[in-house]
Amino acid sequence: MVNTRKQELSTEEGSNTEQPEQSETATSEAVTTSEPNDDKKESDAAAKAQDRQARFKALQARAKSAAERNLKETAAETQRLSTDPGLMNTLSRKHAFASHNLLKADTEAAGEDFERKRAWDWTIDESEKWDRRMEKKQRHRDNVAFQDYTQDAHKVYKRQLRELPPNLEAYEKEKLAAIEKAAANGDLEIVETEDGEMIAIDKNGSFYSTADSVGFTDNKPNRAAVDRLVGDIQKAEEVRLKKRRERRGNEEEDITYINEKNKQFNQKLARFYNKYTSEIRDSFERGTMI
């Protein structure tokens, strides 16, 4: 029994001595496998940090270039706004006029024809177009002054025609419908000429208008055309009344001036102080001012 107990103790000691060796081997293997993982994580973090830094520097460069570009555009806009366009136009017109006079003086000093030399820079079509333009401007200048009421009414009529352009598409549709209706009623007769051209002949004189025709009285315009005509008449009436008020002055307002200069001074005062004194003046008019 004693021997058996010793054998068991020796067996347990042998097994205990083998276990630490196995645990040390497993620990060393875990350490060697964890070291590459840590190195890989550190390299990934470094790469991400470098990528973020590169993107940040790119954003900084874009912001800097945008700020510089905005500054340049702002300076150019400020310079453009500070420059008077009317002054620039005046300077360019004076420069062109001075250049024209200088060229004319040099040409005449050389004994050459200035108009002939200047015409070398233009084609025949451009020259004729320019002459027609100058004639039209001269006629317009001559036509501005009042001559008689007939001429004035003609100018008003031409202006109204420009403001009321015709609807050619609707006109063509109505024309085709009228032709078909006249052909169906037998008022038109289609005849072929010797050249092979087809023409329509008005048999009883009811389709093609003449000086004695009254067929236009049967025409009934649509609602849109009537509204457009009414609007044009109202606009002309407003313009006429406005000019009449300008000639006679505003008859509804109180006369608080003794001459035109005093009227302008009162208008200037009213522009600045009416918002403060309107209640007081209304109270005076009502008789409720204390």
Image (cartoon, rainbow, N blue to C red):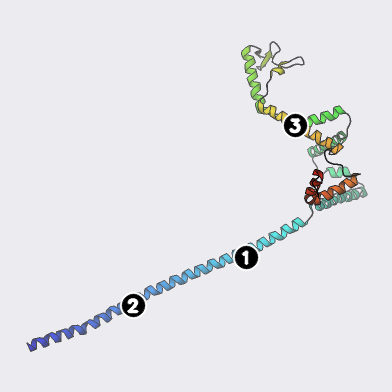
Instruction: Answer with mark 1 or mark 2, whichever residue precedes in sequence.
Output: 2
- Look at the image and tell me whether residue 235 can be seen: yes
Which residue was labeled with disc 1? 64
Instruction: Answer with mark 2 or mark 3, whichever residue precedes in sequence.
Output: 2
Residue farthest along the front direction in this orientation: 290
Q: Relative to residue 174, is residue 5 drawn left or right?
A: left
- Secondary structure of the residue carrying tag 2 is helix
1 vs 3, front mark? 3
The label on residue 32 is: 2
Residue type at mark 3 is Gln
What residue is drawn where x is 37% and y is 73%?
37
Which residue was labeled with disc 3? 234
Between 97 and 77, the one nearer to me in the picture: 77
Q: State which quadrant residue 135 falls in.
A: top right
Residue 214 drawn above or below residue 285: above
Instruction: Answer with mark 1 or mark 3, whichever residue precedes in sequence.
Output: 1
